[in-house]
Image (spheres, helix red, strand yellow):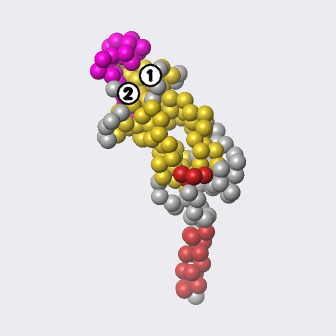
């Protein structure tokens, strides 16, 4: 009896792993991308804070519904390996992302960026300012994270 329960439990666990393997690098397309520097307001009494941000949608070009889809956006300064920040987001609802369907907009931002007493637009023009990029990773079910895109962060202010 215990063996039957164990087999049933393992079968149920395996069935919830997200379905057949999907090569996200080939079947998931990043569309409607917009990047910039988000105004995080005033911190430490008198410093303006700007953080890199990106907004995009994901288009499912596979032949199956992606039930458990997640993204992780990693922000880095250009030509640096160290993370400036990262943000994880679930993409799919209970219905998943059907073949040919595009997700609602996904907005991600770093917790870290630049701060200064200068006006926000002047911070972007500062000679010490280093441009950044965002790397977008996706994960479907129990598969490993796959890097699906990379975009430079535009030197422009975005709305909150």
Give residue 109's mark. Answer: none
Question: At x 47% / y 20%, what residue is drawn?
Answer: 156
Q: Position of residue 159 (x, y in %)?
A: 53, 21
- Mark 1 near mark 2, Cβ–Cβ under 8 Å? yes
Q: What residue is disc 1 on? A: 155
Magenta span of residues:
111-129
- Sequence-wise, the earlier of marks 1 and 2 is 2
Q: Residues within 10 Å of mark 2 (few under 14, many from 20)?
A: some
Element on which disc 2 rests: loop
**Is residue 126 a member of the stretch shown in magenta?**
yes
39 vs 9: above or below: above
Q: Position of residue 82 (x, y in %)?
A: 31, 40
Q: What residue is disc 2 on? A: 131
Question: At x 44% / y 22%, what residue is drawn?
Answer: 155
- Exactly how many numbered labels are in the figure? 2
Q: Is residue 115 visible?
A: yes
**Viewed as shown, does residue 51 lie left or right of 97?**
left
88 vs 47: above or below: below
Q: Position of residue 108 (x, y in %)?
A: 50, 36
State the residue in front, 99 or 115: 99
Question: At x 35% / y 33%, what residue is drawn?
Answer: 77
Q: Position of residue 8 (x, y in %)?
A: 60, 78
105 vs 99: above or below: above
**Is residue 102 a member of the stretch shown in magenta?**
no
**Viewed as shown, does residue 91 lie left or right of 99?**
left
Element on which disc 1 rests: loop
**Viewed as shown, does residue 85 lie left or right of 34?**
left
Q: Residue 119 occupies which quadrant of the picture?
A: top left
The answer for how far apart the CA atoms under marks 1 and 2 are is 7 Å
């Amino acid at each position: 009896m215990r063996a039957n329960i164990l087999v049933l439990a393992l079968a149920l666990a395996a069935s919830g792993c997200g379905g057949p393997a999907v090569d996200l690098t080939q079947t998931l397309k990043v569309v409607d991308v917009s990047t910039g520097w988000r105004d995080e307001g005033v911190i430490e009494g008198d410093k303006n804070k700007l953080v890199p941000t990106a907004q995009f949608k994901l288009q499912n070009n596979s032949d199956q519904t992606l039930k458990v889809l997640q993204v992780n956006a990693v922000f880095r300064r250009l030509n640096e390996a160290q993370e400036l920040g990262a943000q994880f987001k679930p993409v799919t609802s209970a219905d998943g992302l059907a073949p040919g369907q595009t997700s609602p907009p996904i907005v991600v931002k770093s917790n870290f960026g630049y701060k200064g007493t200068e006006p926000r637009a002047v911070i972007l023009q500062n000679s010490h300012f280093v441009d950044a990029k965002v790397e977008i990773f996706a994960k479907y079910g129990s598969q490993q994270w796959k890097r699906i895109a990379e975009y430079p962060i535009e030197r422009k202010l975005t709305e909150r």
